Amino acid sequence: MRIGITCYPTYGGSGVVATELGQELAARGHEVHFISYAPPIRMNLNDPNVSFHEVEVSTYPLFDHPPYTLALATKMLEVFELESLDLLHVHYAIPHSVSAMLARAMAAPRRLPFITTLHGTDITLVGTNREYLPITRFSIEQSDGVTAISQYLRTQTVKVFNIQRPIEVIPDFVNCDVYKRSEDASFRARFAPSGEPIFMHLSNFRPVKRPVDTVEIFALVRAKMPAKLVMIGDGPDRATAEYLAHEKGLREDVHFLGKQDAVHEKLASADLFLLPSQLESFGLAALEAMACEVPVIATNVGGVPEVVENGVDGYLVEPGDVAQAARHAIEILSRADRGREMGRRARAHAKEKFSAKDVVPLYERYYASVIAQSAGS
Ligand code: GMT
């Protein structure tokens, strides 16, 4: 198949899933064309089946807000015509599905079906904003296919938008051949030279991720035992989290690495992963940690319980309950095996339910059914 994929190329789960999906599809022989304003961060341009088409948005004195949505629609049409795309797959509803809708209309009577994958905040935050709700609903209804990354997100979408059409649940996935345990001695020597357990957090540091709670949890643990915290990613709440670490006298113990490539290499050396989000439709970062045999302490919100089984892969706590999260962390790390067995169960669970080799074929089958349906309509 020839597939056009549009996503946010920046740091964020939806862009990561879109890119990993594109890479996996390319490895399975499909031709994948990423269409966005910048190359997605995890994209491998060395793959002959992958190409990137940049959307350029020209400015004009009248444009206070250059119309990216229109430039994207035009680029989608151009790529469809040049590359004979069979399908567009857009990740994150706003504004990508609106652009795809326009591209499909411009392509007619030729067929350019599009699938929208809902990731979370496009429904739970942005989509519920009154300014975007009607157009989000309309673009979901108009899509040739719609997928959601968890049962929770499907239920929310139906409820919030009163959606009548079917929505397929295809979960986030992880490549378990890439995300696996492989402790890096130099990473340990750098961040935990005396063998301290390494806590890790990975996110885009937006308020919904509550990175400040990560530091709070760590501070409570650190008061009881030696430990180190590695914070990966960047975003609006990073400065507050860094300030808190400084205030608590933890500058030597908390390391902010900013945006990183090859996060699997870092996760593979962690002992415990913290994801204290206010809301999470799936929690891809938690799944990636699990695949690396890292137990997870996360919040009991949204789709997270579909991913992390409480007491098995780690623990779930209520948002903001940093004390309970710290108690669980101390309990895991005080075990004779420092949580290794729990980590192994987490990986087994990740492999069994969310392995790329099982989930990517679900997308392939869904693509084929949407293309066939569009051809028949
Ligand atoms: O909110 C984010 O962290 C980014 C957002 C995105 O769309 O880029 O992430 C959402 O999509 C991820 C990939 O499907 C999910 O794993 C995250 O749970 C989801 N985030 C939220 O629902 C807050």
Image: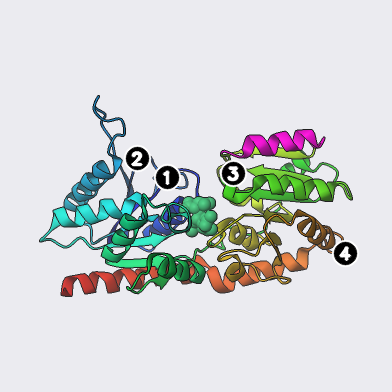
Could you tell me which quadrant the N terminus lies in? bottom left
Percent across and percent down for residue 336 are 88, 64
Mark-to-mark CA distance, 4 and 2: 50 Å
Q: Is residue 244 located in the magenta-colored stretch of the structure?
A: yes
Residue 289 figure quarter? bottom right
Which of the pair 377/81 is nearer the observer?
377
Q: Is residue 273 located in the magenta-colored stretch of the structure?
A: no
Which of the pair 116/16 is nearer the observer?
116
Mark-to-mark CA distance, 3 and 1: 16 Å
Q: Which residue is mark 4?
A: 336
Q: Secondary structure at mark 4?
A: loop
Mark-to-mark CA distance, 3 and 2: 22 Å
Q: Secondary structure at mark 2?
A: loop
Q: Earlier in the sequence, mark 3 or mark 1?
A: 1
Magenta residues span 236-250
- Indicate which disc residue 205 carries: 3
Note whether ligand 1 is within 8 Å of mark 2: no
Q: Earlier in the sequence, mark 4 or mark 3?
A: 3
Work out whether residue 121 can be spotted: yes
Q: Earlier in the sequence, mark 4 or mark 2?
A: 2
Amino acid type, callout 2:
Tyr
Amino acid type, callout 4:
Ala
Question: Which marked residue is nearer to the observer: mark 3 or mark 1?
Answer: 3
Q: Which residue is mark 1?
A: 9
Contact flag, marks 4 and 2 (Cβ < 8 Å) = no
Contact flag, marks 1 and 4 (Cβ < 8 Å) = no
Q: How is the image coloured?
A: rainbow
- Indicate which disc residue 37 carries: 2
Amino acid type, callout 3:
Phe
